[in-house]
Amino acid sequence: MGVRIYDSKLRKVVPLETRDEGRVAMYCCGPTVYNYIHIGNARTLLWFDAIRHYLSYRGYDVTYVMNYTDVDDKIIERANAEGIPPDGITTKYTKAFEEDMAALGARPADIVCRATDHIEHMVEAIGGLIDNGLAYEANGDVWYAVEKFDGYGSLSGRSLDDMRAGERVEPNEHKRHPLDFALWKSAKEGEPSWPSPWGPGRPGWHIECSVMSTKYLGMGFDLHGGATDLIFPHHENELAQAEGLAGDGPFVRHWMHAGLVQMDAEKMSKSLGNFVLAHDLLGRYDGEALRYWILAGSYRSQASFTEESLEDARSSYARWRNFADSVVREAGDAAPDKAPEGDPYVQRFVEAMDDDFNSAGAFAVVHDLVKEGNKAAAAGGEGLGPLVGAFRELTGVLGFRFPSSQDASGIVEGLLDFLLEMREEARAEKAYARSDAIRDRLTSLGVTIEDTAAGPRWRLGGTG
């Protein structure tokens, strides 16, 4: 049936239909680089990287674009607080973001664009919106006139009256409607600014993504991603800007939104003060275990952050890692890197992931595979090759790297194998004290020894 996704604008699961056959053009809103990202930010961006990876596995030629917002009120405030220029703040936290996402196993986007590199294009787009009667200048600022765009509210499914009720709006005496939003902000003393026909200033947040996404992907690109809290106003405003400027639509073929991470029944947010930085978690948890926690639940679900859920994810991931450290390592280069044609585990995995990226079902397939692989290994290894190939293929699609096995050098592996041989010789000589000493010493170093019908084997880590 092919890949099916939940389209946020249509509010239902639909087949993925792309502008160009066999190609996917996708854009995801990246971070505002004024601080470390919290785990909710990381979850959204890791999920869209995983979606990009899976679509590539399914044969699509994917172009993935992500932006950095590197000019913003929050950046200016942070710069003032730290006593350094705004570009010092953005450089510092861009680097931190990239390090954190790499530790979680995310690959860089194919195109990474920065707002400050596209100011000229934004000025041009704002001028076009004024020419089209959809924007107006007032006292050096430029505002989008939401009442002039017939489709305003189509993404969030709300009327202007609904939006006004309960939504925080940007106050300004020069606005014609309370929901009109800033396209250009006139410069204040000491703030970074750029020239424009309306005087020096800087762009509003929303115009950045409309301009950069269409610059690199064109109108009507296939997937636009972000978290659900961006639906309104950010993505609603993006849509109004892009389609208002082009004069027709659609701006995006499919909208996809990831659920938020919650703490104590509230969304995780820096503005609310209830957040946990990904940077801090990576100091306490292995990046692969955090990746497991992020991807094991549906991307659309609201994830509850608790230490218990992270510990559960670490234990579950340990089963995969232990299989990689023992059975897969022992199979070595002779084992296939992929499953055989028609493999039932791969078929089940694809069925799950094709269904709006049902990772819970996909993870269950890998756990079943590991259970069967351990049984085959303990029974002497008959039929193990296809299972190892399927494990390598499917965990690779999910982006897991198992550094505990891949980072062990050949010298370390050789020494461990040699120590196991010495232990076997000691046991054959009934020198049990010596064999037990070897085992105990290896255990103290974090190496677990398992005696199976096929002979002893070792793996790094405990019995998790």
Image (tube, rainbow, N blue to C red):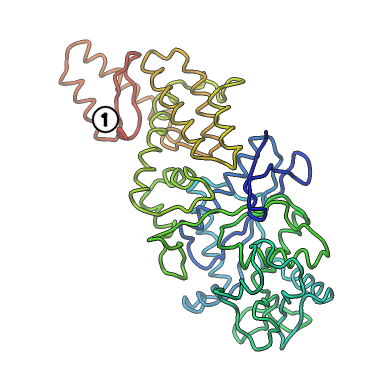
- What residue lies at 37% left-to-right and 61% top-to-bottom? 264
Q: Amino acid at mark 1?
A: Leu
Going by the picture, which residue comes out furthest to the left? 433
Residue 48 x, y percent position in the rendering: 59, 49
Residue 351 x, y percent position in the rendering: 59, 32
Which quarter of the figure has residue 210? Answer: bottom right
Instruction: Answer above or below: position of 40 versus 148.
Output: above
Residue holding disc 1: 442
- What residue lies at 61% left-to-right and 62% top-to-bottom? 231
| Left or right, residue 235 beside residue 411 | right
Q: Return the residue nearer the eye: 193 or 21.
A: 21
Residue 228 x, y percent position in the rendering: 56, 59
* Mark 1 element type: helix
- Quarter containing the N terminus: top right
- What residue lies at 52% left-to-right and 40% top-to-bottom? 359
Which quarter of the figure has residue 244? Answer: bottom right
Instruction: Answer above or below: position of 140 versus 296.
Output: below
- Quarter containing the C terminus: top left
Residue 255 x, y percent position in the rendering: 66, 54
Q: Return the residue nearer the eye: 166 or 397.
A: 166
